[in-house]
């Protein structure tokens, strides 16, 4: 130190003020450390924490590196939710900058003292006057001003990284951060770059000119690669790693914890009964059961982690910060949002008046919600989303999982659940379910399913009325799943309802039994469905009686399954039995009566009893129109059945065309061109056009139905198979026998696998193939016809039109002389050939 430079002691005693003199006494022992002694804190980057590979950050890392190479003076904030990999990105930048001979300073901004001590060391290394630094840091000047005088005057190229600057007040110092007179400022020289990592992403927080760059979660492919980097191929395949990475939401902290855990799995002692995931698949299964597996220690049991390195605590730190900043309800609001499903939460659902019904939200107002949401958004605890063109919120899956787990362990969890159910009920009750509302219903269904899941987990705490409302919402969600052909989720919904009712109402409660019947209807195997429905029916008859409406509803469902199995005669008898009781007890205009009446008419048509079917359909249609109206879904389905029967009779085929065209128009206006009703009506129209001999028009209609329906229903849907077979039969009639045979064989292979050889749909396709087989091998074709006759006679009866058609084909193939009567029967059978399939 130069002799003519005043010492700290001289500065202190130079002032005539007594307090200054006392201060001098207080700091008399403070001396500037000689250059051969270490400083108080290290500002070297902790490169030992740097991952070997930086995955999925190519774009942002290139941008940051460009600022290091040629920086005009920038302050960059890397912001994102806790665990998003901000510090790893900053560490990577620090290593690259050091490799380019840049001076790099790394300062933790966890708290005011740590930040101040680190920046004091930076000021010294930036060649600030040591004594002025000491005075400023002792409170006799502006420490931020002293720091930035040194940094702006420093001639070397430098990078200053302020890590974990989550609390803006810490960076403000004695000034105001947003006004640019706190610890963080934009360098005036072209030699400096400041990089801040923070959970705070609001532009209002940071000084003017600060560059904000969000650090988001990794894409599944990159997330999987991170896991492979850490755990290696012994933990599983890249596909399995990607699947786990996706479940972890691509969050780098979670990926590192999971990968490190699996990497050390060889070191763990396998204690019987202890859960010790060894592979990506094991870990995924464990994670689905308990998110706490993420914080499990790896093989090194001495592992010590800071709070922000624990999934269970990293986001709680953000909530602690919000509480200190005057948002005590932020934690409760995040808990509430985590109780919704993994789907966007509409902002307009957060009705303060409804929420106030719960004691925990007694003082909530719209204005307080409006203040809380930006606070959660700024720290990355929730994200902005859009749902059907309206504002919504989304949560990272792990933020949701951990917060939901913590909500479940709190005493007021029942209030969270009741509030979610109340908000959902107000939104879903009476809300239309049309293709236009499906995007919103997709989210509402997920939220309803989540609410019931919470109820089931807390049945001892949640009031029964709340559980019942949650069940009602999931029933609506199941209806939506059926509309959009999500059969697996629909079955899960009904099963969740059933298990809840079994626990709350008991096995023999009427509602429990009704739900058992609903679940049986979702079985993919008609035989299994029939067996389960029969079991439920037997219990209902014993507990409720033969004439109870739930018993009759199950009887109706049983008739439908018999019809689906091709047991049309048995289905007819079941329908007649149910219809008799319904008419006697509830009358002709009861909706249950109408539904069973339609089923009876349909079973008659399937047996070829066309005159009787026409009579029943006509009467049932008139009743539907009178009771439900001409455009009700059930009325339109009955009209479809009536038109189908008309199309099967040569004398009424033109009337069938008119009915189908009217039906297409109504269904299209009501549900759109891709609704099930519209496509079914167009399929019926195609069949009618073919029977009129208008083959080109029929083929165009078949193809249009397939083009529209296939992406929605899939290749193995019964309606798709029927349309494909009908189109193939028409192609054969028009001369393209090769492609027709290929298409029919494809359909037949699926039907045999799904239904078996004796099902009417399978038999119909086999019969359509017989003439095509005969072109190359008449003997094989005759044998096939023989087998069809044998099976169809046992299943459908010897008088069924399909049996008669097969007999005529066999006779023609074996060249047995045909009587005039048989020839007329063959002509009539040909007219009915390729009858409509369902």
Image (cartoon, grey):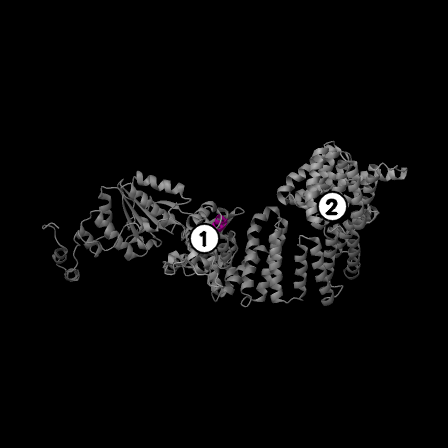
- Going from N to C along the chain, the mark reached first, 1 or 2, is 1
Residue 202 lies in the magenta stretch:
no
Q: Residue furthest right?
A: 820
Q: Nearer the viewer, residue 320 or 402?
A: 402
The quarter holding residue 810 reads top right
Q: Residue at x 24, y 45 (%)?
A: 151
Q: Quadrant of residue 522?
A: bottom right
Q: Which residues are magenta?
A: 240-246
Horizontal side of residue 23 vs 58, given as left or right: left
Q: Position of residue 690 (x, y in %)?
A: 76, 36
Front one among 66 and 426: 66
| Drawn side of residue 417 relative to residue 47, left or right | right
Mark 1 to mark 2 CA distance (whole Å): 52 Å
**Is residue 517 shown to the viewer in this render?**
yes
Q: Which mark is residue 276?
A: none
x and y percent of residue 715 in the render?
Answer: 64, 43
Q: Is residue 232 left or right of residue 732?
A: left
In front of the other: 209 or 697 = 697
Q: Residue at x 34, y 39 (%)?
A: 66
Question: Callout 2: 10 Å neighbours few (<14), some, many (20+)?
Answer: many
Q: Secondary structure at mark 2?
A: helix
Q: Position of residue 468 (x, y in %)?
A: 60, 63
- Pick the front one: 737 or 558: 737
Give the total number of marks visible in the rendering: 2
- Name the residue that disc number 2 marks: 761
Q: Is residue 242 magenta?
A: yes
Instruction: List the residue tagged with mark 1.
Output: 382
Is residue 206 visible in the rendered image? The answer is no
Q: Crowdedness of circle 1 by 10 Å Cα count: few (<14), some, many (20+)?
A: many
């Amino acid at each position: 130190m130069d002799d003519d430079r005043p010492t700290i002691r001289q500065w202190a005693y130079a002032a005539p003020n007594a307090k200054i003199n006392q201060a001098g006494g207080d700091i008399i022992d403070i001396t500037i450390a000689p250059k051969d002694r270490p400083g108080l804190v290290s500002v070297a980057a902790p490169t030992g924490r740097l991952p070997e590979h930086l995955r999925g950050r190519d774009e942002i890392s290139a941008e940051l590196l460009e600022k290091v190479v040629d920086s005009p003076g920038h302050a960059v904030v890397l912001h994102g939710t806790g665990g998003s990999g901000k510090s790893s990105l900053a560490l990577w930048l620090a290593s690259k900058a050091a490799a380019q001979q840049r001076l790099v300073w790394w300062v933790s901004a966890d708290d005011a003292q740590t930040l101040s001590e680190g920046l004091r060391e930076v000021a010294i290394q930036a060649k600030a006057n040591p004594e002025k630094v000491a005075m400023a840091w002792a409170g006799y000047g502006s420490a931020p001003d002293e720091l930035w005088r040194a940094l702006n005057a420093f001639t070397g190229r430098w990078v200053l990284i302020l890590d974990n600057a989550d609390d803006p007040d810490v960076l403000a110092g004695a000034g105001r951060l947003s006004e640019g007179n706190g610890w963080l400022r934009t360098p005036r020289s072209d030699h400096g770059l400041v990089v801040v990592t923070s959970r705070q992403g609001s532009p209002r927080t940071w000084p003017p000119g600060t560059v904000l760059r969000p650090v988001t979660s990794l894409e599944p492919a990159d997330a999987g690669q991170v896991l492979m980097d850490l755990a290696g191929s012994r933990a599983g395949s890249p596909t399995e790693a990607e699947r786990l990475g996706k479940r972890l939401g691509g969050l780098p902290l979670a990926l590192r914890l999971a990968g490190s855990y699996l990497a050390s799995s060889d070191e763990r002692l396998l204690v019987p009964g202890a859960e010790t995931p060894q592979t990506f698949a094991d870990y995924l299964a464990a994670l689905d059961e308990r998110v706490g597996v993420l914080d499990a220690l790896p093989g090194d049991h001495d592992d010590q982690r800071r709070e922000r390195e624990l999934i269970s605590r990293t986001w709680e730190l953000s909530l602690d910060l919000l509480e200190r900043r005057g948002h005590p309800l932020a934690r409760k609001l995040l808990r509430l949002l985590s109780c919704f499903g993994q789907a966007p939460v509409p902002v307009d659902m957060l009705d303060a008046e409804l929420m106030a019904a719960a004691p925990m939200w007694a003082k909530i107002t719209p204005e307080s919600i409006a203040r809380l949401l930006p606070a959660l958004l700024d720290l990355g605890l929730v994200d902005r989303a859009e749902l059907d063109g309206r504002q919504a919120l989304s949560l990272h899956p792990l933020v949701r999982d951990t917060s939901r787990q913590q909500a479940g362990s709190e005493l007021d969890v029942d209030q969270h659940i009741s509030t979610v159910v109340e908000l959902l009920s107000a939104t879903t009750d009476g809300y239309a379910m049309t293709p236009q509302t499906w995007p919103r219903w997709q989210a509402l269904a997920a939220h309803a399913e989540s609410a019931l899941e919470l109820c089931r987990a807390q049945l001892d705490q949640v009031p029964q009325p709340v559980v019942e409302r949650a069940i009602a919402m999931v029933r609506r969600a199941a209806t939506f799943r059926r509309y959009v052909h999500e059969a697996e989720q629909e079955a899960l919904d009904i099963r969740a309802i059933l298990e809840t009712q079994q626990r709350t109402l008991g096995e023999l409660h009427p509602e429990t039994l009704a739900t058992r019947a609903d679940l049986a209807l979702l079985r993919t195997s008609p035989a299994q469905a029939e067996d389960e429905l029969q079991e439920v029916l037997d219990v209902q008859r014993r507990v409720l009686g033969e004439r109870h409406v739930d018993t009759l509803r199950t009887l109706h469902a049983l008739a439908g399954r018999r019809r689906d199995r091709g047991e049309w005669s048995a289905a007819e008898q079941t329908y007649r039995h149910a219809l008799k009781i319904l008419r006697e007890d509830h009358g002709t205009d009861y909706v249950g009566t109408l539904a069973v009446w339609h089923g009876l008419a349909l079973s008659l048509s399937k047996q070829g009893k066309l005159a009787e079917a026409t009579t029943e359909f006509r009467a049932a249609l008139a009743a539907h129109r009178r009771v439900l109206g001409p455009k009700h879904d059930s009325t339109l389905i009955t009209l479809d059945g009536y038109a189908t029967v008309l199309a099967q009779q040569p004398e009424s085929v033109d009337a069938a065309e008119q009915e189908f065209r009217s039906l297409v128009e109504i269904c299209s206006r009501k549900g759109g061109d891709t609704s099930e009703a519209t496509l079914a009506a167009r399929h019926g129209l195609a069949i009618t056009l073919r029977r009129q001999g208008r083959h080109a028009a029929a083929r165009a209609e078949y193809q249009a139905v397939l083009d529209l329906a296939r992406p929605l229903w899939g290749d193995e849907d019964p309606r798709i198979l029927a349309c494909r077979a009908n189109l193939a039969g028409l192609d054969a009639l028009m001369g393209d026998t090769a492609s027709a045979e290929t298409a029919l064989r494809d359909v037949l292979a699926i039907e045999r696998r799904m239904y078996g050889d004796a099902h009417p749909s399978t038999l119909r396709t086999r019969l359509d193939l017989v003439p095509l087989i005969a072109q190359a091998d008449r003997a094989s074709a005759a044998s096939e016809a023989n087998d069809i006759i044998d099976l169809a006679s046992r299943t459908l009866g010897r008088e069924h039109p399909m049996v008669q058609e097969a007999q005529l084909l066999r006779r023609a193939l074996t060249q047995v002389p045909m009587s005039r009567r048989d020839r007329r029967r063959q002509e009539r059978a040909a007219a009915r050939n390729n009858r409509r399939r369902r």
